[in-house]
Image (spheres, grey):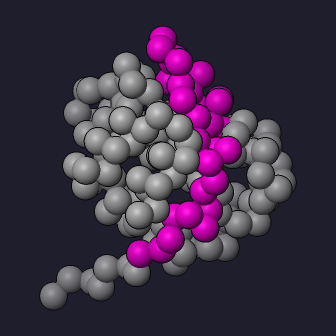
């Protein structure tokens, strides 16, 4: 018997349409990370913008968060973050991300969390993975013509 799966959460609690970005063609991995970090850091739960951006880049240097299927999930946990914040970047042409499958990334889901939220952090990660493994969700995100469309795809 394996461990019980964490209960899934409502991603809409931590995500808003104003933190869903369309990344222009030619966006590099570093540019994408900077744009998503800036959007995340605009949320009041991120109390140290510089530390958050640094943590995102340090995590990415350790190992690419490009998990395959056109998805990357850059993430950081810091004491200076007071609650979860999720930001999404969408790139139709894709971003070269050194993903595990070697393919470009079209959907980036950046997660900011507090170090004190370990159990909830696992639930958020499990939810993101569960939602994005569904072909229809990935297709809806790639076809989204507005942040509202993308938000609906992630939260329905």
Whether residue 146 appears in magenta in the rendering, the answer is no
Q: Residue at x 70, y 66 (%)?
A: 83
**Is 112 left or right of 119, judged from the image as shown?**
right
Q: Residue at x 65, y 30 (%)?
A: 35
Where 100 sits versus 138, above or below? above
**Can the viewer see residue 62 in this picture?**
no
The quadrant of the rendering that contains the N terminus is bottom left
| Position of residue 141 measured from the top left corner of the image (x, y, whole percent) | 39, 42
Residue placed most toward the observer, 62 or 50: 50
Q: Position of residue 8 (x, y in %)?
A: 41, 75
Q: Which residue is the extreme one toward the top?
A: 26
Q: Relative to the observer, which residue lies in front, 58 or 44?
A: 44
Count of numbered circles on the image: 0
Horizontal relation, residue 87 to residue 7: left or right: right
Image height check: is 53 above or below 103?
below
Please state the extent of the stretch shown in magenta in the rendering: 8-37
Where, quadrant-wise, is the C terminus in this rendering?
bottom left
11 in the magenta segment: yes
17 with respect to 11 (left or right): right
Residue 39 sits in which quadrant? top right
Q: In terms of depth relative to the viewer, which is nearer, 53 or 131?
A: 131
Residue in the picture at 62% in, 73% down: 117
- Is residue 24 something that shows in the picture? yes
Residue 102 is drawn in which quadrant? top left
Estimate the x, y position of residue 153 in percent, counting from the top left: 41, 53
Q: Residue furthest left?
A: 1
Residue at 30 percent across and 85 percent down: it is: 4
Is residue 114 shown above or below 53?
A: below
């Amino acid at each position: 018997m394996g461990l019980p799966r964490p209960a899934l959460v409502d991603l809409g609690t931590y995500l808003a349409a104003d933190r869903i970005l369309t990344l222009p063609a030619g966006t590099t991995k570093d540019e994408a990370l900077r744009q998503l970090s800036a959007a995340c850091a605009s949320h009041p739960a991120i109390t140290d913008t510089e530390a958050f951006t640094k943590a995102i880049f340090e995590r990415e240097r350790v190992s690419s968060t490009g998990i395959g299927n056109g998805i990357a999930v850059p993430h950081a946990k810091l004491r200076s973050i007071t609650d979860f914040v999720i930001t999404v970047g969408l790139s139709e042409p894709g971003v070269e991300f050194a993903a595990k499958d070697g393919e470009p990334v079209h959907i980036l889901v950046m997660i900011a969390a507090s170090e004190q939220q370990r159990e909830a952090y696992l639930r958020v990660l499990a939810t993101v993975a569960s939602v994005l493994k569904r072909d229809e969700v990935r297709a809806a995100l790639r076809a989204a013509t507005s942040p509202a469309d993308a938000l609906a795809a992630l939260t329905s």
